[in-house]
Amino acid sequence: MLSKNPIIDLLENLGTELGFCLPLEIKEQIVSEPSWNADAFARAVVAAEGLNPDYELRWCREIRNRFIQYVGSNTYESPAQ
């Protein structure tokens, strides 16, 4: 089921389809950020998985592309709470 937050949905997708199953506290930190751009998000997810984003360019590119697909642009701004 899709949530109202594309970042939550994307993190779920990354876990089920790519195996990036981040701990709940890391997911909550990522979701709580007020804004993301696709590259920073991808690097944060790869690093949270314990990988070096400077070497894992394929993963960064894949996550970046999924970010754009889920968010609809290269940037995401959290709606005002």
Image: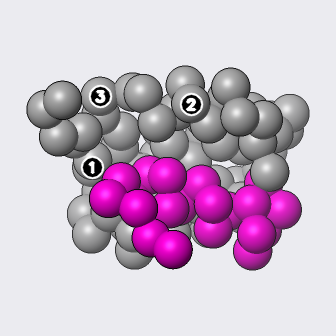
Kindly identify the amino acid type of the residue bearing the numbered disc 2.
Glu
Q: Which mark is residue 75?
A: 1
Element at label 2:
helix
* Cα separation between marks 3 and 2: 12 Å
Q: Please identify the dominant SS of the magenta region.
A: helix
Residue stretch rendered in magenta on the structure: 1-20
| Callout 2 crowding tier (Cα within 10 Å): few <14, some 14–19, many ≥20 | few
- Look at discs 3 and 1 and give the one toward the viewer: 3
Q: Give the alpha-carbon distance from disc 2 to disc 1, as whole Å.
A: 19 Å
Number of other residues with Cα within 10 Å of mark 3, as a class: few under 14, some 14 to 19, many 20 or more: few
Element type at mark 3: loop
Which residue, given by chain and number where applicable, does mark 2 sit on?
28
Q: Residue at x 42, y 27 (%)?
A: 32
Residue 52 in the image, given as x and y percentages of width and height: 80, 35
Residue 34, position as x, y percentages in the image: 29, 28
Which amino acid lies under the numbered mark 1 shown in the image of this protein? Thr
Asked where in the image residue 17 lies, by quadrant, the reply is bottom right
Residue at image x 40%, y 74%? 69
Nearer-N-terminus badge (2/1)? 2
Residue at image coords 71%, 34%: 24
Q: Is residue 80 rendered to the left or right of residue 47?
A: left
Residue 39 visible within the image: yes
Q: Give coordinates of residue 67: x percent, y percent.
A: 45, 61
Of the numbered discs 3 and 1, the one sitting upstream in the chain is 3
**Which secondary structure lies at badge 1?**
strand
Of marks 2 and 1, the one in the foreground: 2
* Badge 2 vs badge 1, beta-carbon distance below 8 Å: no
- Quarter of the view holding residue 13: bottom right
Residue type indicated by callout 3: Pro
Q: From mark 3 to mark 1, how far is it between C-alphas?
A: 11 Å
Q: Which mark is residue 34?
A: 3
